Image: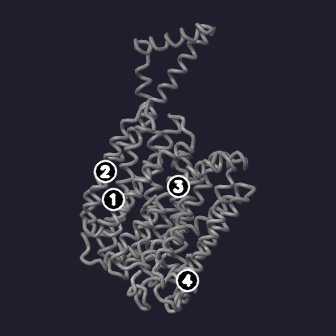
Amino acid sequence: MSAAASAPGSGLYGSDPAYLSPIARRLLDRGVLKWAITLAASLGAILEVIDTVITNVALPDIRGNLGATLSEAGWVSTSYACANVVIIPLSAWLGLRFGKKNYFLFSLVGFTLASLLCGVSQSLGELIFARVIQGITGGGLLAKAQSLVFEAFRPDERPMAQALFGLGVIAGPAVGPVLGGWLTDNLGWRWIFFINLPLGMLAVWMCWVLFPRDEKSSLHPEATVDWSGIGYLSVGLASFQIMLEEGQQDDWFSSNFILSTAIASVIGLGLFVHRELTTEHPAVDLRILRFPSMIGGSIYSAILGMGLYGIMFAVPIFVQDFLHYTALQSGEILVPGALASALTMVVYGRVASRMPPRLLIAMGALLTAGTGVMLMGINPGTGAGDLFWPLVFRGLGSVMMFMPLSIATLGPLPKKDIPAGAGIYSLTRQLGSSIGIALITTMLARRLSVHRTILVAKVTAFSQAASDRIESVAAGLARHGASPMAAHQAAMGMVDRSINGQAAVLAYSDIFFYVAVLFVASIPLIFLLGKKTATPARKADAAAHEEEAAAAVH
């Protein structure tokens, strides 16, 4: 950090020695405090990012150990997602009310303690309760870490800071399944939570020592609390998230439970919108949507969540179901894409100021559409090598879209409106990923049924190829001692399984085609986004309050 930047009154986070601990003041004098703050904030964010995905690979073991059904065990993930999605749009208001450092430390301590509660849970109910606490406190970690990092850097350094921060957080979605699989296989499922304890305590100590104290003038504890708006938001978003998580399993609206959650989400969100547009001190300022770039960016953020996370959801399932990969192996195939994202972030940090954000977003959309087209060629003989380049291109495209999208969306906003815009923008990404996974799960089941019906119609007594296949298999089984009837039945069973496999592969191919079409069709939305901003300061203002960049690197 330059002398100017580190001088008192420079406005940078951590630049005033009067608010620093002795250790932080020494680091400030050496010009490395901003990097230490980056490391501390990144560690807190990484914990939350990894915990979002690490539990999925351990659900079978959790189910067996706690005596739960598959649908009951699914609430371990659902409860976390519901709590997380509610807290994200409130994080800007909470930071303003209680202070940046205070709120971040509270979230970090709460997340660490909730991890301990998860690990010692003796029943499914206890585990779900602890996961709710994890989701509430984890939302604060992810939402605030990025802005703390950017406020510690000069405007001309912030693109590189964003890239460096992403290098740490990008590892989460790739490391999570691999780490979770290894811990579950070797130490037991409880260790996917216990691993957070030493790292969480280290992060708490680093943040306590390195972050400056919150200035009393920046706190607003006396501000009016919009309890009604918070209540409506909680009911609406939690119900909507539950509907998405459990809909396919319960056959959607044929289930009274899913129908009830849908009604509750419509009523809750409707009341929330009305409340926030009519109250003087809203918990979430929805008036920010009057800006075209905010509308276009939020819609595009949801589309990115649907498409990019949809690919990451579908590929591991495919390799586990049809290539018979273990959970650990399915996580390992995502690592090259994560490394490609990390490399792209470094390059982005150097070229961000010289390329229009809309051009980068368009290039990323076309690259991701190409990924979908490449994945359409999957078949029962597909191997890890065939998935390497599509997933690498997916990693490149994700960074090319997510990183500049925040600038194009938030850059045109007035400085005072950026925090509110960032909260909504972050929420749309989270909801988009949930909607995408729900749609993919439903469409896979329905497209599989369609393709199976078509294939079965071709396996008849009048089909010479089918008859020859069945007779050949039956003859082989008969030579190994099976009776003619048993051999014929076994042959029919093998053909049926082959049909199911082929139908599933075709269904996955359809999904990847739809993803490609989605990204091509979304390109016109780019014209609603802001053009390259006129000044570095405007870009810096957008980045400094942008809560999505940390989540975007998933």
- Label 1 sits on residue: 400
Please tell me which of labels 1 and 4 falls first in the chain.
4
- Label 3, label 4: how far apart the Cα atoms are: 33 Å
State the SS at label 2.
Answer: helix
Query: Which of the 4 quarters of the picture holds residue 106?
Result: bottom right
Label 2: few (<14), some (14–19) or many (≥20) C-alpha neighbours in 10 Å: many
Residue bearing mark 2? 367
Neighbourhood count class around disc 1 (C-alpha, 10 Å): few under 14, some 14–19, many 20 upward:
many
Q: CA distance from mark 2 to mark 1?
A: 9 Å
- The image quarter in which residue 537 lies: bottom left
Q: Are marks 3 and 1 in contact (CB under 8 Å)?
A: no
- Is mark 2 in CB contact (under 8 Å) with mark 1? yes
Q: Can you say which quadrant of the picture contains the N terminus?
A: bottom left
Residue beneath label 4, please?
Answer: 98
How far across and how far down the image is residue 48, in percent? 55, 63
Colour convention of the picture: one colour
Label 1's element?
helix
Mark 4 residue type: Phe
Which numbered circle lies on residue 464? none
Does residue 264 lie above or below 340 as drawn? below
Q: Residue at x 55, y 83 (%)?
A: 98
The residue under label 3 is 243
Q: Are marks 3 and 2 in contact (CB under 8 Å)?
A: no
Amino acid type, residue under disc 1 in the picture: Met
Marks 2 and 1, the one that precedes in the sequence: 2
The residue carrying pointer 4 sits among few (fewer than 14), some (14 to 19) or many (20 or more) residues within 10 Å by Cα, namely some
Which of the two marks, 1 or 4, is nearer to us in this view?
1
